[in-house]
Amino acid sequence: MTVQIKKTYSGINPEMLRDEIRDLVQKRGIMVEEAKVQTYALPSGATQARVTMVFKAGEEECGSAEIIELPGGETKLMVDLDERLLSQEGISSLQKDLDFILDSYEVKW
């Protein structure tokens, strides 16, 4: 079973968000196996960024993250974590740390 964390942020640099996610998961013994940053040109001349990350616990893939920078200053984050390979306590603590560190950037609906 997969736990999914979805957040929308405003005014945050996608690369800073990537670094925060990397540091928070590594703090829990999860390694970031792969992180790709892609930049896309928009018709307006602006650019948009997409970051993808793959997480591993030991030798097994245990999750991923995707960060999309949208025109207008919003950034979307989606984290998938495998409950079979990660403790519920670790997942919960990751969610709490994300909320604490990034709360001021989060768009509240």
Image: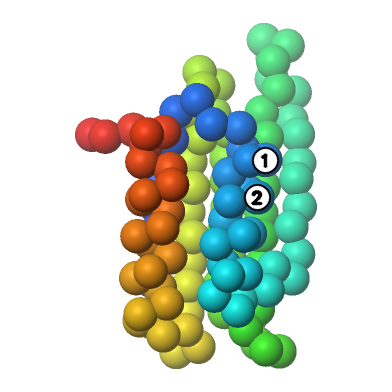
Instruction: Evaluate whether residue 2 shows in this view.
Output: no
Q: Position of residue 13 (x, y in %)?
A: 61, 32
Percent x, y of residue 15: 67, 40
- Residue that badge 1 annotates: 15
Quarter of image, res 41: top right
Q: Whole-Å distance between the Cαs marked 2 and 1?
A: 6 Å
Task: State the residue at coordinates (58%, 51%).
Answer: 20
- Estimate the x, y position of residue 2 in percent, counting from the top left: 41, 76
Discs 2, 1 touching: Cβ within 8 Å: yes
The quadrant of the image that shows the C terminus is top left
Asked whether, in this view, residue 99 is left or right of residue 37, the answer is: left
Location of mark 2 (residue): 19
**Mark 2, secondary structure of its residue:** helix
**Apparent side of residue 33 relative to residue 50 in the rendered image (left or right):** right
Which residue is found at the position 61% from the left and 76% from the top?
30
Q: In this view, does 71 lie above or below 51?
A: above
